[in-house]
């Protein structure tokens, strides 16, 4: 499938049309951003690592009956995906408190939640991705009650699947963010699942193995993403 013209360029990925309107090419770039675009850098090989990391996780989720936009890898840093009509919403689930939850509620970092905590955020960098609830989504027409119920239940199911999956690699899945869209009236997982959009801590040392290394200037960002990939049995190609 041929890449024709760029339709959007986000903080870390670009999307291109193809000769079939049902499909897009998703290109993962080395650009890295945090704090809603306030901190940026280009990290060598991040595009390749994240593209192949995402492909591996999306394919694994498909085997567990999660519908995703992912079709196939096209190159080390590009994938073919379904062209979804995206909801302007971010679905976050947390197993332990860290990041914005600790700041918002004054909770100690690493607090183990009684049950996974689900939250919706509005996807709007200028507003700092504010926390929203079901009523905001329904009243503003960002999604229907049924659609948000589906997004929430898929996110919680992905959490159950991936907590166990990462645990086998001696990693704690602390939290993550998913984005969904519609393809011919079917809600599907879109965007990406990479260490850029989740938190992973080593089970023994509690070392951070995700984008917090970049946010907090801990160093070895992409080397650490590579270690996570190795532990999960991925063969990342950088040539
Ligand atoms: P937070 O602690 O900043 O709210 O983030 C929770 C998790 O969701 C964390 O793994 C990062 C991810 N996330 C993103 O990747 N992008 C976002 O815009 C938001 C709000 C969260
Ligand atoms: N808000 C998220 C972060 O701090 C996502 C982003 O801004 O890119 O990383």
Image: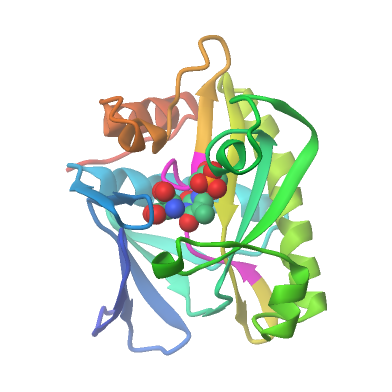
Region of the chain picked out in magenta, as a range: 188-198
Residue 55 showing in the rendered view: no
- Give me the residue at 45% from left, 67% from top: 127
Q: Quadrant of the N terminus?
A: bottom left
Q: Is residue 81 above or below residue 108?
A: below
Q: Position of residue 66 (x, y in %)?
A: 69, 58
User: Residue lying furthest top in this view?
Assistant: 204
Quarter-of-image position of residue 121 = bottom right
- Give me the residue at 63% from left, 69% from top: 188
Q: Position of residue 195 (x, y in %)?
A: 44, 40
Q: Position of residue 50 (x, y in %)?
A: 36, 47
User: Of helix, strand and loop, which mostly describes the magenta segment?
Assistant: loop
Q: Would you say residue 89 sits in the magenta stretch? A: no
- Give me the residue at 60% from left, 40% from top: 175
Quarter-of-image position of residue 89 = bottom right
**Relative to residue 36, is residue 167 drawn left or right?**
right
Q: Is residue 219 above or below residue 86?
A: above
Quarter-of-image position of residue 227 = top left
Q: Position of residue 140 (x, y in %)?
A: 67, 84
Q: Would you say residue 196 sits in the magenta stretch? A: yes
Q: How many marks?
A: 0
């Amino acid at each position: 499938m041929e890449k024709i013209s760029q339709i959007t360029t986000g903080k870390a990925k670009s999307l291109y049309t193809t000769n079939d309107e049902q499909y897009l090419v998703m290109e993962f770039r080395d650009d890295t951003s945090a704090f809603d675009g306030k901190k940026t850098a280009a990290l060598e090989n991040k595009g390749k690592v994240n593209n192949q990391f995402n492909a591996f996780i999306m394919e694994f989720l498909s085997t567990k009956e999660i519908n995703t936009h992912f079709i196939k890898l096209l190159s080390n840093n590009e994938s073919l995906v379904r062209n979804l009509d995206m909801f302007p919403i971010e679905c976050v689930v947390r197993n332990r408190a860290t990041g914005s939850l600790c700041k918002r509620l004054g909770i100690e970092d690493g607090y183990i939640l009684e049950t996974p905590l689900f939250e919706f955020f509005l996807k709007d960098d200028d507003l700092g991705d504010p926390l929203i609830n079901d009523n905001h989504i329904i009243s503003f027409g960002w999604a229907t009650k049924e659609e948000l119920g589906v997004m929430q239940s898929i996110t919680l199911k992905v959490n159950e699947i991936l907590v166990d999956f990462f645990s086998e690699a001696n990693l704690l899945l602390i939290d993550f963010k998913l984005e969904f869209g519609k393809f011919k009236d079917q809600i599907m997982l879109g965007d990406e699942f990479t260490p850029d959009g989740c938190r992973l801590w080593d089970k023994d040392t509690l070392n951070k193995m995700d984008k917090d290394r970049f946010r907090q200037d801990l160093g070895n960002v992409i080397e650490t993403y590579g270690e996570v990939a190795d532990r999960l049995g991925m063969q990342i190609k950088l040539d």
